[in-house]
Image (tube, rainbow, N blue to C red):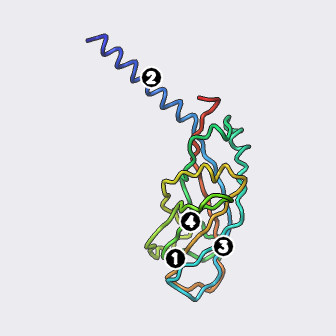
Amino acid sequence: MKKNLCIAFVMLIALSSCDAIDELTKFDLDYEINFSIPPTTIINIPFDLITPDITTNSDASFESNNTRENLIESIKLKQLRLTLNAPDDGNFNFLKEVHVYIEAEGIDEVEIANVYDLENNDLSTLELDVLDEELKEFIKKDNYNLRVTTITDETINETHDITVSTIFRVDAEIFGI
């Protein structure tokens, strides 16, 4: 009986240390891009905005985290935040829903985050709901861009400048571990 308990205890410690080592092989990549929503008088109609290309510098990011592109197991979006930069007194009350898609050359676009039925809470920052999509092929590319589809429920009289902040969680083998 004691022998079985010792074996179970050793196995539990071994599994716990594997989880700790696995956490060491994960790191975050942060990217930001700005875009603008022009004044609009149309409501309840979706319209698309495409961001400029976002340069990944993925090889350098992988190297600084002691890994290489061929050792990446998974990359998933961890967080996507919209921050309103202008107008100074602006808020996101004009938005009803937001969908964000990722695009890269040679890869079909994928929806990565969204938010529905936004309330008028005078917010200048929005956290979108992140979708559980595998994105490593997008981030391995030299650059990607985002397509933001919005539906408004109010007109806006001036351009709204917005920053999209993303955090991608990378799970890699480090030094082949």
Mark 4 — residue? 100
Kindly identify the amino acid type of the residue bearing the numbered disc 4. Val
Above or below, 19 against 75 in this view is above
Position of residue 1 in the picture relative to residue 55 (left or right): left
| Crowd class of label 3 (few under 14; some 14 to 19; many from 20; radius 10 Å) | some
Residue at left 60%, top 57%?
166
Q: Secondary structure at mark 4?
A: strand
| Crowd class of label 1 (few under 14; some 14 to 19; many from 20; radius 10 Å) | many
Q: CA distance from mark 2 to mark 1?
A: 50 Å
Q: Are marks 4 and 3 in contact (CB under 8 Å)?
A: no
Residue at left 57%, top 34%?
24
Residue at the front extreme of this rendering: 106
| Mark 3 vs 1, N-terminal side | 1
Mark 3 — residue? 161
In the rendered image, residue 2, in percent from the top left (x then y), is placed at 28, 11
Kindly identify the amino acid type of the residue bearing the numbered disc 2. Ala
Q: Secondary structure at mark 1?
A: strand
In the rendered image, residue 154, in percent from the top left (x then y), is placed at 52, 84
